[in-house]
Image (tube, grey):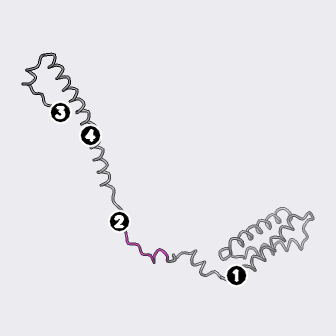
Amino acid sequence: MAKIDKAELEKLTPAEKIKRLKKLEEENKQEIEEAGKLIKETESKLEREKILESVAVPQTKPINIDELFHEEKSLESTVKKEAPKDEKSEEGTLYQLAQAYEEAKDMLYSSAPLSQEQASRVDKLGERIEKIRYYSASDQVANLAVATKTLIHKIKKYQLQ
């Protein structure tokens, strides 16, 4: 802000004095507005800094590469370890399931009513399907087992009434 020099103002004519004072007043208004804006900006920066100071920085811990790749102790991992890895038994199970599925599908869609022998065959198929272990079977075996169970349920519900 420019200071008012009273001695210099006394030398001016009244019209020039008013003109000069109005100019000083306008300059002072602009400086006051600018100072107000700067005050608001500074206050907002202070608020942000206070917030940043109040937020705790998380502590970092050293990374152990071995821990990233070790196997977790869980029920799922235990089951996977204990499950037999014999692919022949899984292929055999898949083959038996496929046969059971086809047999159940044929019985469901046959137009003739089921005989007593076929009804007992449906029960035996259902028992065999119930014994299959899902946790050791692949997704394909599990899906086929569920589909066969569904067909057996439908046969019992609609054909054996």
2 or 3: tag closer to the N-terminus:
3
Front position among marks 2 and 3? 3
Answer few, some or many: residues within 10 Å of disc 3's Cα (few below 14, many 20 plus, some between 14 and 19). Answer: few
Front position among marks 2 and 4? 4
Name the image quarter holding the N terminus: top left
Question: In this view, which residue lies farthest toward the left?
Answer: 7
Range of magenta residues: 60-69
3D distance between C-alphas at marks 3 and 4: 15 Å
- Mark 3 sits on what residue? 1
3D distance between C-alphas at marks 4 and 1: 76 Å
Question: Taking 2 as reference, is 85 above or below it?
Answer: below
Which disc, if any, is residue 101?
Answer: none
Answer few, some or many: residues within 10 Å of disc 1's Cα (few below 14, many 20 plus, some between 14 and 19). Answer: few
Which disc, if any, is residue 38?
Answer: 4
Q: Three-letter amino acid code at disc 4?
A: Leu
3 or 4: tag closer to the N-terminus:
3
3 or 1: tag closer to the N-terminus:
3
At horizontal 75% and vertical 76% (from top left) the residue drawn is 94
Question: Taking 158 as reference, is 32 above or below it?
Answer: above
Q: Is residue 139 left or right of 99 when viewed as pictured?
A: left
Front position among marks 3 and 1? 3
Which disc, if any, is residue 59?
Answer: 2
Q: Is residue 110 left or right of 49 when viewed as pictured?
A: right
Image-quadrant location for residue 149: bottom right
3D distance between C-alphas at marks 1 and 2: 48 Å
Q: Nearer the viewer, residue 68 or 16?
A: 16
Image-quadrant location for residue 15: top left
- Mark 1 sits on what residue? 87
